[in-house]
Amino acid sequence: MLGGRAPTGGAAMLGLSRLFGSALRLLGQAGAMERAVVRAVPSEPKLSISLNLFGSQRQLQRDQTEPVGKALARISASATKSKKRKEPVPGPPVHLFYQGQPVPEGLPNSEAWQDGAELVVERRTYRVERNPPMCHELELPLHVMAGFPLCPRVRMEFADPDRSLFVWYKQARAGDSPDRQAGPEWEEAGRERVFSPEVGDIGLRLKLICTPGDGKRFGESREVEVSGPVEAGPGACTFDERHLYTERPAEPPVTRVVSYNVLADVYAQTEHARTVLFPYCAPYAMDLHYRHCLLHKELAGYRADLVCLQEVDRSAFPYTLCPAMEAFGLDGLFRLKDKQHEGLATFYRRSRYRLCSQHDILLGEALTGDPIHQPLLERLSQYSAAMEKVLQRSSALQVTVLESTADPSKKICLANTHLYFHPNGGNIRLIQMAVALAHVRHVAYELYPGIPVIFCGDFNSMPSTGMNSFVKDGTISEDHPDWMSNGEDERCNMSLSHPLKLKSACGEPAYTNYVGGFHGCLDYIFIDSDSLEVEQIIPMPSHEGVTSHQALPSVSHPSDHIALVCDIKWK
């Protein structure tokens, strides 16, 4: 699987063989001559020249506009230092050739250092590689379990992970190698970007060698070893049976959508979480690396095209979620909450959708700063306590406009949010939702007139609440009891309306959140009922599975929430 799902059958093997054959030939050719690696980015004022001069690795930073003759003179001076002569002597002659002809010394560096040129230092010849594929970072997750995908975090430059080589190795068992004193013996285990160790690998160490490529060239390889041996998995997980319904990806015109509160580590690791919220959950199962090991397998198995996540840790997004989702074929966007360490993440399958624009907001900030909310702000200003509470909240709204790669005329407005959590905050959630819907209406009705809406999130609202009625009915009366949800001091009675035609794609499950002291439906995927229809709702996990370890999260489920998964299509 060189990015995304692996091709199958003989075509896949033929493709891999050709890719590896090309890599070996190119790397062999490069190995026949020493390399002078030039990194030249047009937007940067300097370029770098890296080469080994008489056993000493040198890296020179030169202005891109500088005549190349000055750069060659500097290389000559560096070569003299590398030889460590006791007395000052003139540097060795240094010349640059391209296609057999000397490069004029007055030519600027930006034009002189071409890929394939030859640099001659005394009698030593270097092949110039301009902006070759580079792998700057390669890291593996800390937690590795049998049966769960292992997704490397890789940072490349001038390279495409889909055109790079990933070769996995596993440690040979003691009986497989006669000489154990020379260190562990390794045997090849796979040639895929994402690797899932098997039960037979438990107790073994793994390593990965990545060779960056761009489709024409390959760069220097980088190697990384897993910090610990492969561990046994937890057995059956809550999402295993759900994956039976998503074994195949959705085919156009159907799109698979996931909404999931993944439980931020900043909340899972508090003393309150360990002793009050989730005392039934084993401490090791609350660890972020363990939970994300489960999460990666769960999300990969849904084969979704659009994924909206809530409570995504700021550090987890780039370090664990993005590498996994990118390897599964999805690109991601992140919106941090105000003054928080977690936020919202939206992913879309890049083979199906292309990013058009982003329109993210902070709900409280938008209420006071965007003129479209002025009527609501004027009414709310009559209720100072409620207004103060709304403006104190850190809630964000992520709005992404995507277009179909197959038919760019088909665009969609994908919204994602996480509303105020307090059980008595129904009035605050109504105001937040009014701001969110007005903003979505602005994007879907004015900026992109007529595009359908998908609105995912953890709305912290049961089906019977005013927030839910407001979304689906389009109105809320000023005498609704939720305006008094936190008592007389914080009431803010008003009538609200919005023009969007939304319905819950997954209906109203018995619960989407199941913890020791509470269970209920708080999460929804609202879709445009005029333009979209539901093709399939992926069944929720069995109650026996959810409660097999008392409640959520558990050793077999990574969050206190349950993902909503459905297939939708244009009418």
Image: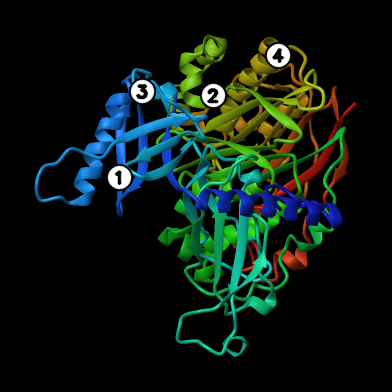
Query: Which of disc 1 and disc 4 is earlier in sequence?
Result: 1
* Label 2 vs label 3, nearer the camera: 3
The percent position of residue 560, horizontal first and vertical second, equals 61, 56
Query: Which of disc 2 and disc 1 is earlier in sequence?
Result: 1
Please name the amino acid that badge 2 sits on. Cys
Q: Which residue is mark 1?
A: 58
**What's the coloring here?**
rainbow
In what element is the residue under mark 2?
loop
CB under 8 Å between discs 2 and 3: no
Q: Classify residue 184 as left or right of residue 108.
A: right
Estimate the spatial distance between the alpha carbons at disc 4 and disc 2, rounded to whole Å.
Answer: 33 Å
- At x 47% / y 64%, what residue is drawn? 274
Residue 64 disc label: 3
Whether residue 441 is situated above or below residue 505 in the rendered picture = above
In what element is the residue under mark 3?
loop
- At x 33% / y 41%, what residue is drawn? 121
Estimate the spatial distance between the alpha carbons at disc 3 and disc 4, rounded to whole Å.
Answer: 43 Å
Whether residue 547 is situated above or below residue 113 in the rendered picture = below
Category of crowding for the residue at label 2, using alpha-carbon neighbours closer than 10 angstroms: few (below 14), some (14–19), many (at least 20): many
* Label 4 vs label 2, nearer the camera: 4
Q: Which residue is mark 2?
A: 492
Estimate the spatial distance between the alpha carbons at disc 3 and disc 1, rounded to whole Å.
Answer: 18 Å
* Label 3 vs label 4, nearer the camera: 3
* Label 1 vs label 2, nearer the camera: 1
Query: Which of disc 1 and disc 3 is earlier in sequence?
Result: 1
Q: Which residue is mark 4?
A: 448
Q: Please, which residue is most extreme toward the left here?
A: 87
Query: Which of disc 2 and disc 4 is earlier in sequence?
Result: 4
Which of 462/525 is in front? 525
